[in-house]
Amino acid sequence: MKRLWALALCAVLLAGCAAPAAEPPDDGRLQIVTTLFPYYDFARAVAGDRADVTLLLSPGREAHSFEPTPLDAVRISRADVFVYNGGESEAWVDDLLDAAGANIGTVLCMMDHVDALEEEFVEGMQGAEEEHDHEGHDHEDGDSDEIEYDEHIWTSPRNAAALCEAICGALCDADAANAAAYRANCGAYTAELRALDGRFRALREGAARDLLVFADRMPLLYFCDAYDLRYRAAFHGCSGDTEPSLATLKYLIDKVSQEHIPVVYTVDLDSRKIAEAVSESTGASIERLYSLQTVSRADFDANETYITLMERNLKALEKGLA
């Protein structure tokens, strides 16, 4: 894989040499490349007008199936600052950095800057019984016992503030002349994140309920952990499943009925098919929560941000926790 990346980089760079007009002039601005929307948004907030920020995962695209193109590899190799999440979903980054990392000014792995939480399988979730059985048996020699961490670290606003500070540090290292401006921008933005965190905490303190039901994947583990919320879901955060078992669907329907849950949630760009089945059987309404790993093209073009989309989450939670 490393050799393939090196060959791809050479091929695209050689093609660029044949067409020099395609290379934009160097205007001295930082070139920042990010893999996911939250980091794209954080980098823009911290950098202000002093950098060009590129988002690799195009709006509307599923993050877990993303595979970078050779052109993406070239963009990364030419970056002053490359910001990526880390974890299994971005395992491709290691090979790319081995092939082209020496050319990148600063490489920032965001999972290094928070306390990662282990993935959870809760009652009723697809695969929960298999996970329980797996944990209940001794591992044979050669069996994998590696801990799997949830990768959706930005979903807690407090984590988001820490991630912005890490980005600020990287920009200051890459462009010391503008460090004061980056720190000022970061301070203003993290103040907004702390205010957002306060609004979620106030909602939680006044809530009549503490249980969220996701008729979908559940990529909001860090959010639920931050605000002491329980949850039930069809799938765990990075699941590629699209159809729940009958047992999982029945569990969700029974849970919503027994606890008189008023709202079931879907996430991001996923289908509402499971939620509609639960809603039809129970009368619960359907709301969407945003994990922000990716955003729709419409939201991206409308300049929605981490904060504006989290404010949508706040309104959706007001209905479900009442």
Image: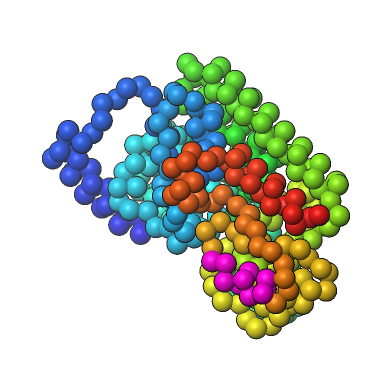
Where is 200 relative to 250, above or below? above
The answer to which quarter of the image holds residue 122 is bottom right
Question: Which of the 4 image quadrants contains residue 217?
Answer: bottom right
Residue drawn at x 63%, y 54% as measured from the top left: 289
The residue lying toward the viewer, choosing from 275 and 97, is: 275
Where does the magenta region start and end?
A: 271-280
Say which residue appears at 62% left-offset and 62% top-offset: 266
Residue depicted at x 54% and y 18%: 181
Please tell me whether residue 254 is drawn above or below residue 212 in the rendered image. Answer: below
Please give left or right for residue 209 compared with residue 236 in the image.
right
The location of residue 104, given as percent across then percent down, is: 39, 36
Q: Is residue 142 or residue 25 the one in the foreground?
A: 25
Q: Is residue 14 left or right of residue 321?
A: left
Whole-percent x and y of residue 232? 73, 67
Q: Is residue 108 visible in this depiction of the protein?
A: no
Decide if residue 205 is in sight here.
yes
Is 195 left or right of 269, judged from the image as shown? right
Q: Check the picture and name the quadrant holding the C terminus.
A: bottom right
Q: In which quarter of the image is the N terminus?
A: bottom left
Q: Which residue is drawn at 54% across and 30% down?
A: 45
Picture coordinates of residue 208, whole percent (x, y): 86, 55
Magenta span contains residue 123: no
Residue 196 sits in quarter? top right
Closer to the camera, 151 or 137?
151
Main secondary-structure element of the magenta-colored stretch: helix
The image shows residue 280 at horizontal and vertical percentages of: 66, 74
